Amino acid sequence: MNKMDEQNKSVWKNVIENAVMLYPAESVARFLGRNYSKIDRAVISEMKALDIGTGSGRNLKALLDYGFQSYGIDYIADACNIAKNNLQGYKNLKEIYCGNFTEYNFNMEFDVILIFGVIFLRDVKSITNDLLVINKLLKSNGKMFINFRTTYDYLYQTGQKIDDNTFILENEYKDAVYSFFNLDEAKELLINTGFKIENIEREDYYKDNLHKHNSWWMLQVTK
C-alpha cells in the first residue's frame, strides 16, 4: 500500500468509527430502481454485484435487498468487521473481502459494480489505473455506478495542492487525498478507460448551517 493509501486509510478509519452509516445513499437507490426494479428477482438472484469501498456496508445492503449475489471489499479492517456485523443473516452475502481491490484476484466478473464515495480519494494517475482494473471486473453490458467530487465542492482548492485536480486536505478530513473534476474531465476519465456513459446526474447539498457545499457527479456506465 502506498503512502497516499496509508494517509486515506488512517483518515477514513476514524470517519467510519465515528459515524457508522446504515442506510443506502439515495443516488444508489435511484440507480438500482432505474435499472433493476422491473427485473424478476429470480433473474437477479443469478447476477453478481460488487461494492468497492464497502465502509459500514450501507450500499452493499441495497444490493443484498435487491437479491444480487453480493460481494464487498474495503481496505480498512474495522470497516470490514462493521459491515460483516451489520449484514449478518443475508444468505446472498457471498463475501466481504478486506484488502485493496486492485490487488485482489476475484476470479469472476460482475453484472453490477458500485464504487461510491471512494474513487476520488487518489490522484488522477491512480484513479485511471483503478478504472482500468474495474473495467476488467465488469461484465460486457454490465453496469457500474460511480461518483466524483466536482470542482464546485467546498473542499476544492483547499489544503496542499498536488496537481490541478488533487489536494491533501487540511480540514475535518485532514491529510486525506482528494481529487476533483469538472464534468468533461470525469467523462474523459471513464471513456479513456473503456466505459460507455449511459446517465449523468449531479448531486448538491449544503450542510453545517449552509456553510459547506457538497457536490458530486453521479455516472452510470457500461462497457
Image (cartoon, rainbow, N blue to C red):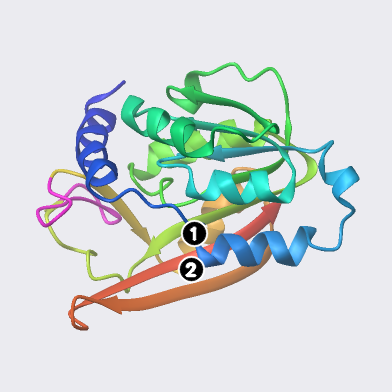
Q: Which residue is mark 2?
A: 183
Q: Are marks 1 and 2 in contact (CB under 8 Å)?
A: yes
Q: Residue 89's mark?
A: none
Stretch in magenta: 161-174
Depth check, front residue: 15 or 215: 15
Q: Position of residue 12 (x, y in %)?
A: 26, 41
Task: Please determine whether, in this image, residue 142 is positioned above or below residue 6.
Answer: below
> Mark 1: which secondary structure?
helix
Left or right? Give the position of 60 relative to 12.
Answer: right
| Vertical arrangement, residue 96 with respect to residue 47, above or below | above
- Give coordinates of residue 191: x percent, y percent: 62, 52
Question: How many residues crowd around disc 1 within 10 Å: few (fewer than 14), some, or many (20 or more)?
Answer: some
Q: Is residue 154 magenta?
A: no
- Rounded to the nearest angstrom, the CA distance separating label 1 from label 2 is 5 Å
Q: Quadrant of the N terminus?
A: top left
Say whether residue 220 is left or right of residue 142: left
Looking at the image, which residue sits at the far front?
Answer: 89
Mark 2 closeness class: few <14, some 14–19, many ≥20 residues within 10 Å: some
Helix, strand or loop for the magenta stretch, by majority: loop
Say whether residue 170 is magenta. Answer: yes
